[in-house]
Image (tube, rainbow, N blue to C red):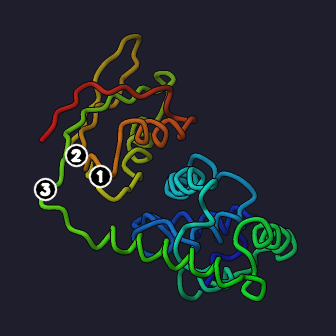
Amino acid sequence: MGFGDLKTAAGLKVLNDFLANKSYIEGYVPSQADIAVFDALSGAPSADLCHALRWYNHIKSYQKEKGSLPGVKKPLGQYGPAGVEDTTAAAPAAADEDDDDIDLFGSDEEEDEETKKIKEERLAAYNAKKAKKPALIAKSSILLDVKPWDDETDMAKLEECVRSIQLDGLVWGQSKLLPVGYGIKKLQIACVVEDDKVGTDQLEELITAFEDYVQSMDVAAFNKI
């Protein structure tokens, strides 16, 4: 398993294809698997790798709390599609990982009983929260206007980027192109969200991250379901 060399365009292409139908590297919530792969990258993927860029921007928002995410960091070769060997340059990644171990996670050998207890309590609380099934899930129907930079923007690619955003509690609906003026059209797209999981600010942050295609995003309509 692996992604090839994540420092190269070829490795990022493998990562992009891997994330085409996944929100995270493993499972259905952010975890140390995402942090391990994120830390191995040299920077944000290019805009044409929309699945990888969507994932990168999402995991980037967890950087202040990455130490509390569930799971255990494993070598890069234990993540990714089968049949691909990890060849990512080891030296920079190892240095970053050492810094993280000292500042955020603590090594297994140096971790005291109190730290272990805190991690176990956090993980137990997290699992209990996920296991709890509320009697009623509040949802909203949202209509978004996504505007391009100009009339030369590839609107099909813009919509592909928007729909590549996959979040727990988000379902994309129908879309259409509407004229704005001077030959420019905007994408109007509907979605249904679970209010406790997805907000309009989060959607705006993720959508406008595709800055090669998206100029701005507005909420055209918002209705509780």
The residue located at (33%, 67%) in the rendering is 129
Of pointers 1 and 2, the one earlier in the residue sequence: 1
Tell me how far mark 2 sits from mark 3, CA to CA: 15 Å
Above or below: residue 28 compared with residue 160: below
Q: Do the residues labelled 1 and 2 touch (CB within 8 Å)?
A: yes
Q: Position of residue 85 (x, y in %)?
A: 67, 85
Q: Is residue 180 above or below residue 138?
A: above
Q: Mark 1 points at which residue?
A: 170
Q: In which quarter of the image is the N terminus?
A: bottom right
First in sequence, mark 3 or 1: give its number: 3
Location of the C terminus by quadrant is top left
Q: Mark 3 points at which residue?
A: 136
- The three-letter code of the residue at mark 3 reads Leu
Q: In this view, does 86 lie to the left or right of 136?
A: right
Is the residue 5 above or below the residue 191 in the image? Answer: below
Label 3 neighbourhood size at 10 Å, few (<14), some (14-19), many (20+)?
A: few
Q: What element carries label 3?
A: loop
Cα distance between the residues tagged 3 and 1: 17 Å
